[in-house]
Image: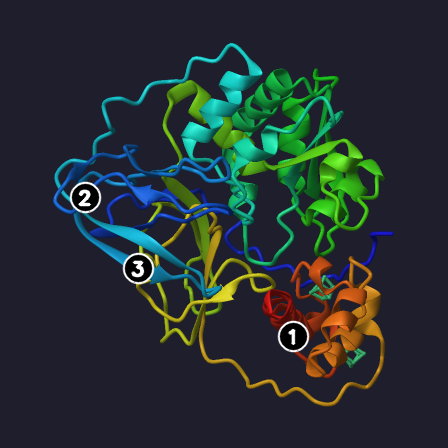
Amino acid sequence: MILNSVKLPHFARAAESITEVFDSPKTVVIAMSQHAGAPCEPLVKIGDFVKCGQLIGDSEAFVSAPIHASVTGKVVAEKEITFLNGRTSKALVIETEGEQSVFEDISPPVISSREDFIKAIRNSGLVGLGGAGFPTHVKLNYDRTKTTIDTLVVNGAECEPYITSDYREFIESSDEIINGIKLVMKYLEIPKAVIGIEKDKPKAIAAMREKLENEVNISVRALKTRYPQGAEKVLVYQVTGRVITEGELPMSAGCLVINSSSVSFISNYIKTGMPLFWRRLTLDGDIVDSPKNIVVPVGTTLREILNFASVKDIPEKVIFGGPMMGNAVYDLDMPITKTNNAVLVFGKQKEIKSTACIRCGKCTYVCSMNLTPTALEHAYDARDAEELKKLRVNTCMSCGACSFICPAKRNIAEKNLLAKQFLLTADKK
Ligand code: SF4
Ligand code: SF4
């Protein structure tokens, strides 16, 4: 049963800040791999002039997503970048030049069937904006002879502290969200949609309910403010009561889960043909004077974003994403990708030392995947691949709830990441 969770402190200082647009970075670094699946190959070369929305990277692989220029300017370099998870990617460096203009070939897609719709979503470059980065067209392209989807579950939980980018989408683009939901329902023939929003966002719940007053097939479910409410398996259970068994996807429970900002993007793309080359993110942290939500071109570097922020002290730690699942950045020249939803900037923190496990069991109690983090830790320390498999380490979703609750401040969630990596290597041998 998927029920366990933790209550996190509610930090959402940027919630009521209207999104500002930062559209003029000097340089962007656009990674050719911003998604799960095959990386793209550059379609332009050094010296080429590109415009906003122009296709600059693609792959023939189905599980991939095309990459578009996010600024108008000149390609000045191609380089390799290393992401925070250790993966590497080719990247194009573009210096902005002249007036920022949209590529001439951009026009709304013509859609008359499910196939057209899925193809259009592929061309848009959309990947899951909740952070997973799975190409959306792949998710939509399920085999209808084997899978019946009766519920579209729209993920508006945004359950990590600080992050308010989806929340702003609800407040600023509620019509787009509803239109995007209707488009997915229409072309995929899904009869019902439920939007899951946590109760600590009452304005978003009210805004959506008001707009949906006369809709019988789309509803809003107010969810308890718990973490990790936005994890797909947890969300599906909370919204429909259906349990997704181990190793299965939400589709096995008749559900298709899509992020609220993703459906909003779909609506905008179908109307305008403007592909995904910008990103809304929350800029916050204890040394950020005025937390805000900003829209930046994909590829904007952290260095340029920090210039835009009013930071009152020397940053000691910068995180891409939320404090629970985000990653600390080691290089200020790291670029924003399509999947970033927050930049958090922190000053010097009190050092926290881990102590011995007191066997309180809290880590097991809060794990929504019903794992036993202490047993996993022992198995990893012993490099026992069989035991790690038996204890289902690969179902750990790295939510960090176990580390958060641990009174001994043990980094048990981190150990699971190492254990998964160890299993990968052990299986290859
Ligand atoms: S990080 Fe993994 S083990 Fe820890 S609570 Fe989350 S799912 Fe469970
Ligand atoms: S929460 Fe921490 S102290 Fe308690 S059992 Fe888990 S690892 Fe040990």
Give amino acid for label 2.
Answer: Lys
Give amino acid for label 3.
Answer: Glu
**What residue is shown with label 3?**
80
Precedes in sequence: disc 1 or disc 3: 3
Q: Quadrant of residue 283?
A: bottom left
Please give left or right for residue 72 compared with residue 168 in the image: left
Numbered label attached to residue 45: 2
Q: Would residue 171 be visible to someone looking at this image? A: no
Numbered label attached to residue 359: none
**What residue is shown with label 1?**
415
Q: Quadrant of ligand 2?
A: bottom right
Q: Residues within 10 Å of mark 3 (few under 14, many from 20)?
A: few
User: 205 above or below 333?
Assistant: above
User: How many angstroms separate mark 1 from mark 3 (CA)?
Assistant: 28 Å
Q: Residue furthest front?
A: 429
Precedes in sequence: disc 1 or disc 2: 2
Q: Secondary structure at mark 2?
A: loop
- Rendering colour mode: rainbow
Q: Residue, x 77% and y 85% (percent of image)?
A: 357
Q: Secondary structure at mark 3?
A: strand
